[in-house]
Image: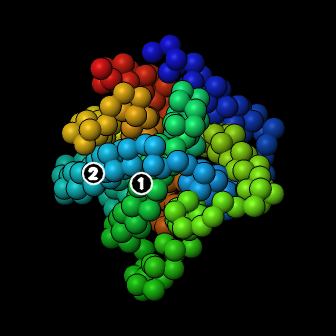
Amino acid sequence: MSAVFASLIPTFLIIATGWLCRATGFVNDQQWVGIERGTYVIFFPALIIDTLSRADLTSVPVLGVGGALVGAILGMSVLVLALRPLLESRFGIDGPSFTSVFQGSTRWNTFVGLAVAGSLFGQRGIALIAVAIAAMVPLLNLLAFYVFIRYAGQPKRSPWDILRSFVTNPFIWSCAVGLALNLLAPPLPEPLANYIEIIGRAALAAGLLIVGAGLDIRRLARPGIPHVLTCGLKLVLLPVTAVALAQYLGVRGDDIVVTIIAASVPTASAAYVLARQMGGNAALMAEILTLQTLLALVSMPLLIAVLVE
């Protein structure tokens, strides 16, 4: 328990630093846009490529951890979609707001997952998070695109436009490149590998600062059904489901802890950007992100303590 707190404290201090920089105006809105774009298009793809290309996937339970996370996400997606009629009729949650509920219940913050797993378990933790990235990132982006197209009330898009948006997503193509380098290509020349690694190092700090910059404590004055529901589903039910599936698939020990970390981190900061771009309820998404980020500091260590034998 103390080790988990020790690994989480630096992560959340960086998040708090981002919030402080934004709240005091030390970094203004236009500067945050540039940091966010650089992280999304340059730093994070480099981190994914470096992580996936270097990961020793033969030494970790790829099918166990990856299969458990994929199964948990698919199960959660089916549950949230099944709740859609009730949420609309009983609680007045419209289509754009539902997209925030869906993203808040399923997506994960890769920055936080990498930081915590790497701090706790070193290279093995990073290798397992690489498995989680390869398993979850393409699937989650595909599901999010579907939900926005179906419920956000956007103009109908052609299959080609949808496919192009999906393929050009930096999270998607960097996964493909990293896996291809790992499985099909010889090791990169050392100068090129070092170049990618150095750029990728910036992603964790920049990503966590961006998460902090997106927090708005004032939005949490009156949490409603969407906030409570998404926190319960994402921070409790999803990790419990993932652990049950992982144990069924033979995953044990520290690998279970990394599975919990990958499943119990708050929703992705990119969910807010996607909500703004595709007609979702961006304000609600920011509120959900804020609340989950704060609660995860308590919920993640508790889940690890309760679920790990």
Against 301, residue 73 (above or below) is below
Tell me the quarter of the image containing the N terminus: top left
Q: Which residue is mark 1?
A: 136
Mark toward the start of the polypeptide (2 vs 1): 2
Residue 26 occupies which quadrant of the picture? top right
Residue toward you, 196 or 112? 196
Return the x and y of residue 229 as percentages of the image width and height.
30, 39
Q: Specify few, some or many for label 1: CA neighbours under 10 Å numbering under 14, 14-19, or 20 or more.
A: many
Q: From the viewer's perspective, is 307 left or right of 103?
A: left
- Verify CB contact (< 8 Å) between mark 2 and mark 1: no
Q: Which mark is residue 186?
A: none
Find the distance from the CA under tag 2 to the CA under tag 1: 10 Å
Tell me the quarter of the image containing the C terminus: top left
Q: Which residue is mark 2?
A: 71
Q: Secondary structure at mark 2?
A: helix
Give the residue type at disc 2.
Answer: Gly
Give the residue type at disc 1.
Answer: Met
For image coordinates 46% across by 43% down, the residue present is 59
For image coordinates 49% across by 72% down, the residue present is 166
